[in-house]
Structures are given as C-alpha cells and as structure tokens.
Image (cartoon, rainbow, N blue to C red):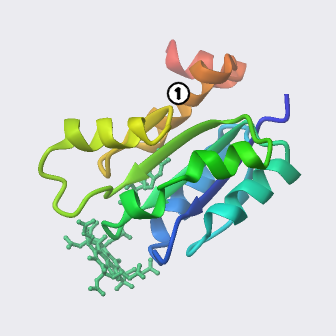
Amino acid sequence: MSNTVVLGVIGSDAHVVGITILEQAFRTAGFNVVNLGVQTSQEEFAEAARAHDAEAVLVSSLYGHAKQDCQGFHDVLEAADVDAVTYIGGNLAVGQDDWERTRETFEALGFDRVFDSETDPEEAIAALRRDLRITPPETERVAANT
Ligand code: B12
C-alpha cells in the first residue's frame, strides 16, 4: 500500500489554513501527503492521484461553491483511472443550514465521506484508517489505552 493521500482546495477557493493543518495531521499519522494547495482543478487532483498512486483524495472547500466545483469530479477521476477513497470537507454550502442535506448532496456526487467545518483532523484520520484497513502505529495504540 502506498499510504498516499492527495489533498487540495478545489476550484477558485483560496482558503489555505485548513489544508495546512490537515497536511500536518495526516503526515504525523504516518501518511504520505501530496498537498496540491489552493485553487486546484479537478484535473490536477486526478493527475496527482494517478501519478502518486494515491489511496485517498481529500478535497477541501470553504467558500460555499463546492457543489459547482465538484460536478463531474468522479468522472474525471475515473477517466484518469484513479480508484481512491474520496473525502470532502469544509464549509460545503453557503450558510450550511441543513447539514444532512449537504451531506447527501456530496454523497450523491460520489464522495465516500463528507465532513463539516467542525471536523477534528483526528476524526478524518480514524475514518481513513478504517476505510483503508490500516492499523494505527503501536505508539498511538499504547497512548489510547493509558
Ligand atoms: C481566513 C478567511 C479568509 C481569508 C483566507 C486566507 C487564506 N489564504 O487562507 C480571506 C480573507 C482571503 C478569505 C476570503 C474569502 N472568504 Co473567507 N474566511 C476566512 C475565515 C475567517 C477563516 C478560515 C480559516 O482559516 N479557518 C481555520 C481553519 C483551521 O479551519 P477550516 O478552514 O474550517 O478547516 C478545518 C475544517 O473545515 C476541516 N476541513 C476543511 N477542509 C477539509 C477537507 C476534508 C477532507 C476534511 C476531512 C476536513 C476539512 O478541517 C480543517 C482543519 O481543522 C472563515 C470563517 C471561519 N471562521 O471559518 C471565512 C469564510 C470561510 N470565508 C467565506 C467567504 C464567503 C469568503 C469570500 C468568498 C469572501 C468574498 N466575498 O470575497 C472569499 C473567497 C476568496 C477565495 N477565492 O477563496 C465564508 C464562506 C461562507 C460559506 N461557505 O457559506 C466564511 C465561512 C466566512 C463567513 N462566515 O461568511 N477568507
């Protein structure tokens, strides 16, 4: 397993703080992280995921236009022969007044998991380890049991 995660902020979105935190958290948890930064196109995600044989593609969006930016995203991944777990997180809708509906919208777009802006990075790491069947390193298991 490559344990590689491709991460970026999709579309014209320039909010960089969230993915910087996610990058550090996933790296500390033992993943290889390819951070594409802000204002990343669908094609850039797909090319990087293919080039690095990524097992997960993590999309971030904060500015409220995620639904438009993610139309056809999974078709682009498929066309590039990318078979990876896909997560999206952040401020996914303008206002975020109905989270259940927002979650369903992004699941319908093909994402395996959808996270809101209150998500602790550890939650996403735990979910990815479950999805990829990765056992946490012994140091973390010992810490969790003390
Ligand atoms: C700082 C900021 C800016 C800065 C960004 C600077 C930079 N280069 O990063 C500037 C001033 C440039 C900016 C611009 C804009 N912003 Co702004 N910005 C913020 C602000 C105040 C903080 C964002 C931040 O850094 N948070 C701290 C980090 C740590 O948290 P985070 O980004 O949420 O990320 C965490 C989680 O969301 C989650 N997460 C994020 N992505 C993912 C992905 C996955 C897979 C997972 C698992 C988890 C996850 O984990 C992260 C780490 O804990 C927020 C309001 C807020 N309090 O959140 C508004 C906010 C995001 N901005 C907003 C808006 C509207 C804009 C503009 C469109 C405003 C405008 N009209 O110009 C522009 C967009 C410009 C652009 N092209 O992107 C809105 C979005 C509204 C919405 N979605 O409904 C917000 C919510 C403010 C508001 N209440 O209206 N912004």
Of the pair 48 and 76, the residue shown nearer to us: 76
Residue at the extreme top of the image, as rendered: 145
Determine the residue positioned at 58% across, 19% down. Answer: 130
State whether residue 36 is above or below residue 99.
below
Q: x%, y% of residue 110?
A: 50, 37
Local packing at callout 1 (Cα closer than 10 Å; few below 14, some 14-19, many 20+) is some
Residue 24 in the figure: left or right of residue 71: right
State whether residue 61 is above or below residue 142.
below
State whether residue 64 is above or below residue 25.
below
Q: x%, y% of residue 115?
A: 38, 42
Q: Quadrant of ligand 1?
A: bottom left
Q: x%, y% of residue 136?
A: 66, 22
| Mark 1: secondary structure | helix
Residue at the extreme left of the image, as rendered: 97
- Image quarter (top left, top right, bottom left or bottom right) of the N terminus: top right
Residue 83 in the figure: left or right of residue 7: right
The reply to whether residue 27 is in sight is: no
Amino acid identity at mark 1:
Ala
- In this figure, which residue is indicated by the disc labeled 1? 126
Of the pair 81 and 103, the residue shown nearer to us: 81
Quadrant of the image occupied by residue 54: top right
Determine the residue positioned at 72% across, 55% down. Answer: 46
Residue 115 in the figure: left or right of residue 112: left
The reply to whether residue 109 is in sight is: yes
Determine the residue positioned at 44% across, 42% down. Answer: 109
Determine the residue positioned at 76% across, 41% down. Answer: 82
Quadrant of the image occupied by residue 101: top left
